[in-house]
C-alpha cells in the first residue's frame, strides 16, 4: 500500500509520535535514563547525576516528568535520600522563601 503524504497535512505531523499533550507543557522524550545507559544501580555518590532528578527546591521530581521507570525511580529515591544524608544534596534549598 502506498501511503501518500501530502504537504497539506493538518495539525502537527512531527515524527508520528503518540504523545498526548493535553496541556501546553513541553515534554522531553520519555525514556528511562538508567535503562538507556543499562545501569543497574543508581550511585548515591554521583550527586551531579542525582541533581537532575531533583527540583530547584530540593524535591525529587516525579517519574511521570523525568520518564524514569518504576524500578529505577525507586532506586533513585533511595540514592537521593542517601545523598541528602551525606549532605551531597539539600533536603530543602535555601532559595525557598
Ligand atoms: Zn529504568
Image: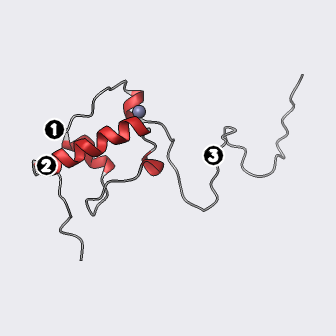
- Label 1 environment density (alpha carbons within 10 Å; few <14, some 14–19, many ≥20): some
Q: Nearer the viewer, residue 31 or 5?
A: 31
Q: Is residue 24 above or below residue 79?
A: below
Under circle 3, the secondary element is: loop
- Label 3 environment density (alpha carbons within 10 Å; few <14, some 14–19, many ≥20): few
Quarter containing the C terminus: bottom left
Q: Give the quarter of the image for residue 58.
A: bottom left
Q: Earlier in the sequence, mark 2 or mark 3?
A: 3
Q: Could you tell me if the residues under marks 3 and 1 are in contact, i.e. CB atoms within 8 Å? A: no
**Residue under circle 2?**
88
Q: Could you tell me if the residues under marks 2 and 1 are in contact, i.e. CB atoms within 8 Å? A: yes
Quarter containing the N terminus: top right
**Residue under circle 3?**
19
- Residue 7: image location, x then y, percent: 82, 42
Q: Nearer the viewer, residue 9 or 47?
A: 47
- Residue 14: image location, x then y, percent: 67, 42
Q: Residue furthest right?
A: 1
Q: Is residue 5 left or right of residue 40?
A: right
Q: Earlier in the sequence, mark 3 or mark 1?
A: 3
Q: Which mark is residue 45?
A: 1
Amino acid at each position: 500500500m502506498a501511503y501518500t503524504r501530502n504537504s497539506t497535512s493538518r495539525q502537527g505531523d512531527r515524527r508520528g509520535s503518540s504523545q498526548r499533550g493535553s496541556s501546553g507543557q513541553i515534554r522531553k522524550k520519555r525514556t528511562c535514563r538508567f535503562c538507556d545507559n543499562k545501569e543497574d544501580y543508581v550511585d548515591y555518590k554521583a550527586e551531579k547525576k542525582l541533581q537532575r532528578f531533583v527540583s530547584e527546591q530540593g524535591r525529587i521530581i516525579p517519574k511521570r516528568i523525568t520518564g524514569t521507570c518504576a524500578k529505577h525511580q525507586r532506586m533513585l529515591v533511595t540514592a537521593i535520600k542517601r545523598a541528602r544524608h551525606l549532605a551531597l544534596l539539600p533536603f530543602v534549598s535555601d532559595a525557598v522563601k
